[in-house]
Image (cartoon, rainbow, N blue to C red):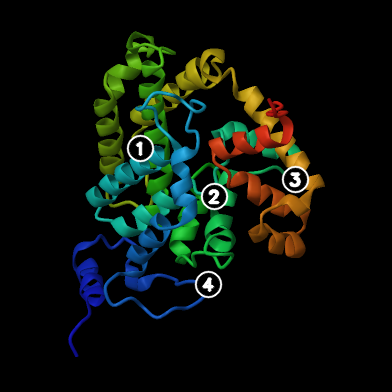
Amino acid sequence: MEQTIRERTEALERQTLSPRACLSADSKGRAVDIPPCPMRTCFQRDVDRVVHCKSFRRLKHKTQVFLQPEGDHYRTRMTHTLEVSRIARTMARGLRLNEDLTEAAALAHDLGHTPFGHAGERALSRMVEGGFRHFEQSLRVVDRLENEGAGLNLCHEVRDGILCHTSGRIAETLEGQLVRFADKIAYINHDIDDAMRGGVIFPTDIPVHISQTLGYTHGERIETLTMDIIRSSGEGDAIQQSPAVAQAMAELRQFMFQSVYFNPLAKGEEGKAEDMICLLYEYYYKHTDKLPSEYQDILMREGEQRAVLDFIAGMTDTYAVEQFNDLFIPTGWMVK
């Protein structure tokens, strides 16, 4: 019998990928078994499932760093996601790891992010016991919320990469570990670019010794960081950086916290955004009948807190503002 396109791709993976790579044919599978696709490997299929889902489309209207910027060139949560994906795939290719698995986890890693970026995350954490973590919500999106409540039924390795993309547990696969590094490389560098565009920092503000190690431009820094991971990880069992580059990146990240992430010029409006999210949470917690129909099943099965969290976390910045205006801002008298 003639091989399918998928089977030929799986055979090519065995021939060309590193022994450390996670082969598509060796995936631990899905929570719900489905027939294999004749064209796509399981990880290629997951890429498509993520890109075509509603939560992915909403990322274009969610904050990365600057709240609802008016300029055309500032990053959103979607452009951040795309940059993470490209950086992660470049490193996966250099290490002969599975690019499709890497891409699937990278594209899905922030699906659970709140409106207004980490300001929204902090607000929801204030409202619920045990806090709110966007990486856990990203997994909940693909497991429970998407596809009319059926979830996307992604492969085990993709789900693990989503859950482990930030601090905490290390991903089981090297591809998942790459996503964590790619996320940091992407946000540090594009946040520098956006902060310079907004006049928050200037090129000469970055300490010279950091630039001497990582490079002086956006492209130089990304090339240094990605090449260092490829060279330092080599044929080892973990994704890692060289000590010098890891130290420089940590210092650059600390510089960004001091100069941008805690800078009132860039973040002065975030307190208002947090208050807005808290007020929306309190309103919908008291008026659960106002939740959209797709959250009523969650309300019955998992309770008020879970339903309201899922609804608000899924909002875009613009939708959250619209809801706030409708609920709390009086409308002018229209009769003349």
Q: Is residue 251 above or below residue 292?
A: above
Q: Residue at x 34, y 40 (%)?
A: 83
Q: Is residue 232 left or right of residue 27?
A: left
Whole-Å distance between the Cαs marked 4 and 2? 21 Å
The front one of 276 and 136 is 276
- Where is residue 106 shown, x and y percent of the image? 40, 49
Looking at this rendering, what residue extends furthest in the bottom direction? 1
Rendered-image quadrant of the C terminus:
top right
Q: Is residue 167 above or below residue 210?
A: below
Q: Is residue 134 above or below residue 335?
A: below
Secondary structure under the numbered disc 4 in the rendered image: loop
First of labels 2, 1 by sequence position: 2
Q: Are marks 4 and 1 in contact (CB under 8 Å)?
A: no
Whole-Å distance between the Cαs marked 2 and 1? 18 Å
Looking at this rendering, what residue extends furthest in the front direction? 336
Nearer the camera: disc 4 or disc 3: 3
Whole-Å distance between the Cαs marked 1 and 3? 45 Å
Q: Is residue 246 left or right of residue 18?
A: right
User: In the figure, residue 206 lies in which quadrant?
Assistant: top left
Rendered-image quadrant of the N terminus:
bottom left
Amino acid carrying mark 1 in the image? Gln
Secondary structure under the numbered disc 2 in the rendered image: loop
Amino acid carrying mark 4 in the image? Ala
Amino acid carrying mark 3 in the image? Tyr
For disc 3, the marked residue is 284
For disc 4, the marked residue is 31
For disc 2, the marked residue is 169
Q: Is residue 128 visible?
A: no
Whole-Å distance between the Cαs marked 4 and 3? 32 Å
Amino acid carrying mark 2 in the image? Arg
For disc 1, the marked residue is 241
Q: How many marks?
A: 4
